[in-house]
């Protein structure tokens, strides 16, 4: 049976293509993934697995639940069907000059004989999510999506040509940066609240760099006013929100659906309170908050009187306050998350940490774990970050998932000092003394 599709005919490079609209039901039934252009079956299986993971976790829930759902155009190749395009002439229209050839505008009908096969060159995740979502809600089949159609020739040259286009569309597509996603996302609560904090809070707006690319705070003067970039600020907030109200599950689904305004207000107040609490209690930050110093000034090594120390070349030596760097904020957030989840007071924990744990990155427990004093730079992976978070959490008497004996040995191995000890127990109101005693007993040599 012949199939007529309303379309616009266009040309770019040496490709003729057609732009049309199809019902999701038709797309789901008639469009395939691009397995035909892959010569290697194992390669296709890898692609299928990669597609399936993202589709099930993010895209299908989006189609099923988001009222403002919208997909960009699918690019499909069509095989067979003897496509034939017929112009539809416009006889009367005041916007078209009578002297022009009305057929050149590309309005028309694309006719297939019914034997055509479509397969996706760009939009495979979208196609698969449409197919999966329609299985759960067939009513979605009535909705429509833009489709760009290119004719595929089933010859060696045609296959090579189509495969090259597939590669170009997928390999050269540049995803938006994490910073850009944070800057524009209107569904991810962490992004929404992070933006609001640096827009509305007078302190954070001058301390967080609205950088859409790099996560790094560098020694350059241009970064002196800041303690974090937008991406690192976002990541710290995500950790802190995981402890909100006893534990918040932040996964792909959470980030896909905007919470109510009341919930967003609660998230904002909670995060603002935590940030203000530690910024005002952190040693060395008072001068920054009062405008007498920049954050970059306290990221430099100083003597006991606060006088900067210079190298032989007359340059200040990097070091200083660990919390003026994103890595220090990450670790503090990791500890505070554990504090909150275990039902303790974040305010009391911040006070205890800022009073009893050195903030100087050139001192234990930071130095030689997340800070390289020779290279004068932070050099920390997830293991190093967790090691220090566990050390501080243990000093606070919190439950951690590492045996104390193992924790001490790992710390000694990392700093390459067999005599190094963990932080002394911190006496604070939230510290369960009996638990700490049991931990210490476990650490006693046999």
Image (cartoon, grey):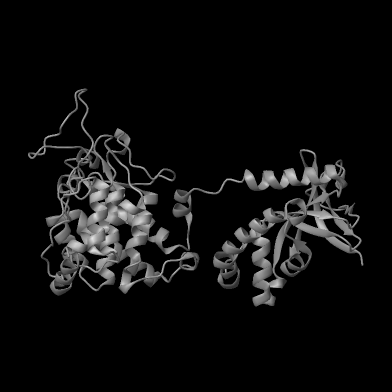
Residue at x 67% of width, y 56% of height: 123
Q: Nearer the viewer, residue 368 or 439?
A: 439
Residue 289, relative to residue 245: is it above or below? above
| Residue at the extreme left | 305
* Image quadrant in which you'd find residue 24: bottom right
Residue 328, relative to residue 346: is it above or below? above
Q: Is 254 positioned to the left or the right of 28 in the image?
A: left
Q: Is 67 positioned to the left or the right of 317 in the image?
A: right
* Image quadrant in which you'd find residue 98: top right
Residue at x 11% of width, y 37% of height: 303
Where is residue 37 shown, x and y percent of the image?
76, 51
> What quarter of the picture does the N terminus occupy?
bottom right
* Image quadrant in which you'd find residue 100: top right
Q: Is 249 positioned to the left or the right of 99 in the image?
A: left
| Residue at the extreme top | 313
Q: Nearer the viewer, residue 187 or 337?
A: 337
Answer whether residue 231 is visible to the viewer in this image.
Answer: yes
Where is residue 56 shown, x and y percent of the image?
58, 67
* Total tally of numbered discs in the picture: 0
Q: Nearer the viewer, residue 85 or 188?
A: 188
Where is residue 227 shown, x and y percent of the image?
28, 46
Residue at x 11% of width, y 39% of height: 306
| Residue at the extreme front | 446
Answer whether residue 202 is visible to the viewer in this image.
Answer: no
> What quarter of the picture does the C terminus occupy?
bottom left
Where is residue 435 shown, x and y percent of the image?
18, 73
Residue at x 83% of width, y 45% of height: 158
Residue 29, relative to residue 285: is it above or below? below
């Amino acid at each position: 049976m012949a199939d007529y599709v309303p379309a616009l005919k266009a040309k770019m490079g040496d490709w003729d293509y057609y732009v049309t609209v199809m019902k999701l039901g038709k797309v789901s039934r008639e469009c395939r993934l691009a397995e035909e252009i892959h010569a290697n079956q194992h390669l296709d299986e890898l692609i299928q697995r990669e597609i399936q993971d993202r589709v099930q976790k993010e895209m299908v829930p989006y189609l099923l639940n988001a009222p403002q759902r919208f997909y960009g155009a699918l690019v499909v190749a069509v095989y067979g069907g003897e496509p034939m395009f017929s112009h539809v002439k416009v006889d009367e229209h005041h916007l078209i000059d009578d002297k022009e050839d009305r057929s050149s505008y590309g309005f028309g009908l694309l006719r297939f004989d019914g034997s055509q096969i479509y397969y996706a060159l760009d939009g495979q995740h979208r196609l698969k999510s449409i197919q999966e979502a329609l299985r759960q809600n067939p009513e979605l089949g009535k909705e429509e999506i833009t489709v760009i159609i290119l004719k595929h020739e089933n010859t060696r040259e045609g296959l090579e040509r189509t495969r090259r286009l597939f590669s170009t569309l997928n390999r050269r597509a540049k995803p938006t940066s994490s910073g850009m996603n944070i800057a524009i996302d209107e569904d991810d609560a962490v992004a929404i609240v992070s933006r609001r904090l640096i827009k509305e809070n007078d302190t954070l707006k001058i301390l967080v760099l609205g950088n859409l690319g790099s996560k790094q705070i560098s020694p350059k003067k241009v970064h002196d006013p800041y303690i974090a970039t937008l991406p690192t600020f976002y990541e710290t907030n995500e950790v802190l929100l995981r402890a909100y109200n006893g534990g918040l599950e932040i996964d792909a689904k959470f980030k896909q659906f905007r919470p109510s305004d009341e919930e967003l207000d609660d998230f904002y107040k909670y995060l603002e309170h935590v940030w203000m609490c530690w910024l005002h209690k952190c040693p060395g930050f008072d001068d920054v908050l009062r405008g007498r110093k920049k954050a970059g000034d306290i990221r430099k090594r100083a003597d006991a009187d606060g006088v900067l120390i210079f190298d032989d070349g007359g340059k200040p030596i990097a070091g200083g306050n660990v919390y003026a760097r994103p890595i220090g904020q990450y670790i503090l957030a990791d500890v505070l998350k554990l504090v909150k989840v275990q039902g303790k007071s974040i305010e009391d924990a911040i006070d205890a940490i800022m009073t009893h744990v050195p903030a100087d990155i050139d001192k234990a427990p930071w130095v030689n774990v997340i800070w390289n004093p020779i290279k004068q730079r932070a050099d920390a992976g997830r293991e190093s970050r967790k090691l220090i978070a566990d050390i501080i959490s243990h000093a606070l008497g919190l439950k951690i998932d590492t045996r104390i004996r193992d924790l001490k040995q790992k710390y000694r191995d990392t700093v390459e000092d067999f005599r190094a000890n963990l932080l002394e127990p911190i006496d604070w109101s939230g510290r369960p003394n009996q638990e700490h005693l049991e931990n210490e007993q476990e650490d006693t040599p046999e």
